[in-house]
Amino acid sequence: FFSTPFATSMSLHFGLLWPVGFTALLLLITGVPGVSASGPRHATFINEIHYTNPASNQQVFEIAGKAGTDLQDWTVVMYEGGTVHDTVTLTGAIPDQQEGFGTLAFQGNIPSTHPSALALKDAAGNLVQFLSYGGVVTVGGE
């Protein structure tokens, strides 16, 4: 999925190119989380987080998964320490960008202080993924 010449720029899968200057947490994976020989448990996940971008001040996270996955009413809850910082309600269907998988990018008020975390929840409110960065984050009920 990834080709990462970190010294000059970062070239990511699906033809996206992120310029130098991004502070990004890249989730380098070898396969799709939740997919096993017996079938997927959940193949939708937070693929990338950009919480500091000096060039445009945009804070972006990316959701990856199987093409056609409807993200209507899914949410990403952002935590600063153990406190809710922001919540983004997702929309749209994941496009087929490569071999039946794709990504959608969303803007949010992503905390740049540490430790922080993002939680991906499906439309029913079930926790799909919880990621912390910059340290350990403990959130009740997550």
Image (cartoon, grey):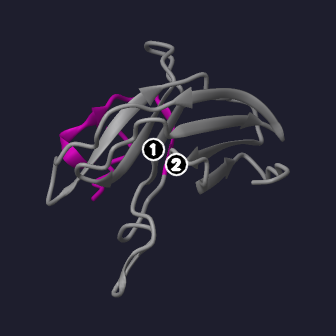
- The residue tagged with tag 1: helix, strand or loop? strand
For the residue pair 125 and 35, the one nearer the viewer reads as 125
Look at the image and tell me whether residue 9 can be seen: no
State left or right for residue 56 relative to residue 5: right
- The residue tagged with tag 2: helix, strand or loop? loop
In the rendered image, the vertical position of residue 1 relative to residue 92, given as above or below: below
Q: Earlier in the sequence, mark 2 or mark 1?
A: 1
State left or right for residue 93 relative to residue 44: left
Q: Horizontal and vertical percent for residue 128?
A: 56, 57
Magenta residues (range): 1-26
Q: Residue at x 36, y 87 (%)?
A: 38
Q: Horizontal and vertical percent for residue 112?
A: 67, 29
Q: Quadrant of residue 17?
A: top left
For the residue pair 8 and 126, the one nearer the viewer reads as 126
Which residue is identified by label 1? Answer: 48
Q: Quadrant of residue 19?
A: top left
Question: Which residue occupies the extreme bottom position in the image?
Answer: 37
Considering the image in quadrants, where does the C terminus appear?
A: bottom right
* Label 1 environment density (alpha carbons within 10 Å; few <14, some 14–19, many ≥20): some
In the rendered image, the vertical position of residue 31 relative to residue 80, given as above or below: below
Going by the numbered disc 2, the residue's amino acid type is Asp
Considering the image in quadrants, where does the N terminus appear?
A: bottom left
Which residue is identified by label 2? Answer: 122
For the residue pair 81 and 119, the one nearer the viewer reads as 119
Q: CA distance from mark 2 to mark 1?
A: 18 Å
**24 within the magenta span:** yes
Q: Residue at x 51, y 44 (%)?
A: 123
Q: Horizontal and vertical percent for residue 63?
A: 41, 44
**17 within the magenta span:** yes
State left or right for residue 131 relative to residue 122: right
